[in-house]
Image: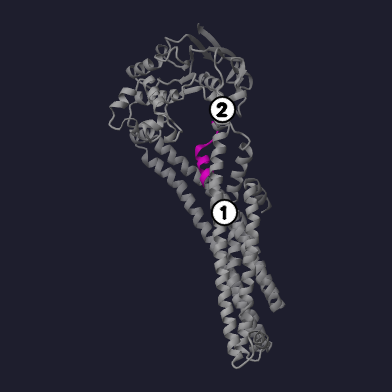
Amino acid sequence: MREIVDELKYILSAKEKGQLAGLFFMMLAGGFLELLGVSVVLPLVQAIMQPDAEIIGVIGGIIGPGEGVHRRVVVFLALLLIALYIIKNGFLLWMYHVIFSFVYKGMKNLSSRMLSVYMGESYAKHLHRNVSQIQRTVRGDVSGCYYVVKFLLQIMTEAIICITLVGYLLLTDVKITVFLMALLGICCGLFLFFSKKKVKELGTISQNSQTKMNQWILQSMGGMKEVRLLGRESYFVEMYNEQNKAFADVNRKQQVILQMPRMLTETVCICGVMILLIVAAKAGESMENMVPVFAVFAVAAFRMLPSVGKINTFLTELIYYRPTVHAVYRDLKELEGERCYSQKECSELMPFRQVLSLKDVSFRYWNTEENVLKNVSLEVPRGKAVALIGPSGAGKTTLADLIMGLLEPGSGEVSVDGTDIKSNLSGWYRQIGYVPQSIYLSDDTIQNNVAFGLREEEIDEEKLWKALELAQIAEFVKQLPEGIETRVGEQGVRLSGGQRQRIGIARALYHDPELLVLDEATSALDTDTEKAVMDAINHLHGEKTMVIIAHRLTTIEKCDIIYEVTKQGVVQKKD
């Protein structure tokens, strides 16, 4: 429990911690109202059953003596009880509204915060991140965190109610209260002790199953063509169903365990009260004297038993959701200090007037021993087209990522006009247009895919059309019935391969970058389509500085400088 609280203290904001203090005082007020409601029951029962009871005289003195005082006292106490329960339940309803507003607002904020953290982590770490795990954490684990907060608040609420009621019962009859509370405490403690390990195990299985379910969905949808052609639909459905079954089984078992505390507390209390009643009857106790006492215990039990059951249930839920809190805490603590994005952090573009240089750059990926690149030095003059060629796995894409600042060298320096790009990474990012081999297109309009990541009101249509013209696709877009408002389908399925690549080039050019990096941007195209796309790229020769990664020599024949990247190093082949 202490570990969960410590991790939540890190996860929750300072404002949320302050709000929790306010909620605690609200819960104290709720417990006080619960106590008032029960405290009226004993006087009412005594007034009904014993016309000469002391309470008649006390309240009669308040409402005024006279004829029918007994009846008027009963009516007064009955109306007081009604009023107290209306006020109490109205307050509790408002309190739960405040609690759940706090929980779900926090859930929304933490989910956005987690996505921001993952978006801000270094690119090198991102390469080792599992997308399914990110999906689970941002949505499922974040929800689990605030379920835990909700359970803790509800445990506190129900505990305060129970403590106030037990305090009142102690004033009514110490022996009966101690006996029942001891019996209840022992039974509930044994239940938690024996169920804790199983519930924790179920929580871990549930978390892993959710990750794998997400993974199988992404894999089956992402490779739909291959899945369909190979006839592997049943395989992916079966693999998903295995995890789905595990998830369903875990939740079934969890829900059964959650029902046990309520049944346990009811059984224990009923048995305890009946034992006391039997003992009192055998001891010759007056039933007339016992009825008011048992009536108070009955009313208290009516309110307290659900609370005790809920406390047990919520404690079980805490154990179940424990892995989700730890997952969020672990990633927040590791990554929150990293903010490798946000182009708004630096308003100044990084000037690129002469040359981009790599000097004695070495790099190895996280969690590996061998350098991918070692002591690499090269230059990319402004306005020139520079090619990177070499066999697969030699490190061409890694070299391009270092040039763009996505990866940080283990040693050496990447500089622009003598200034290390680390001094203004966000300003350097804004100088780069990137065209990968496989263009990511969202199921949106051409306009929104070119001006990627901008709200529609932020899009500059003049810049949009200029980018389309430079990419040699403006005429095609103009012929479409809906023009730039044409939807391209998921992953651009309504466009040809060449059209997708040119949309990608237009996206890279929209922000008018100084450096254009093309990572095998035409290698997946047929010869004719590649020639058309390369014509669009070559049209930019002299206007933009270009770094082109390619396998085919025809792709780079117009480049000014060619570097060959091999396992042995980087060698300049053409100047």
Instruction: Give the residue furthest to the bottom.
Output: 67
Q: Nearer the viewer, residue 278 or 365?
A: 365
The residue beneath circle 1 is: 102
Q: Nearer the viewer, residue 140 or 102?
A: 102
Q: Are marks 2 and 1 in contact (CB under 8 Å)?
A: no
Specify the amino acid type for callout 2: Ser
Which disc number belongs to residue 390?
A: none
Above-or-below relation of 283 to 346: below
Q: Can you see residue 504?
A: yes
Residue name at image x 52 percent, y 36 percent: 130
Q: Is residue 135 magenta?
A: yes
Q: Quadrant of residue 234?
A: top left
Majority secondary structure of the magenta segment?
helix
Residue name at image x 54 percent, y 14 percent: 353
Residue name at image x 33 percent, y 29 percent: 495
Q: Which residues are magenta?
A: 127-139
Q: Nearer the viewer, residue 337 or 17?
A: 17
The residue beneath circle 2 is: 347
Q: Position of residue 98 (x, y in %)?
A: 56, 58
Of circles 2 and 1, the one toward us is 2
Instruction: Give the residue furthest to the top.
Output: 575
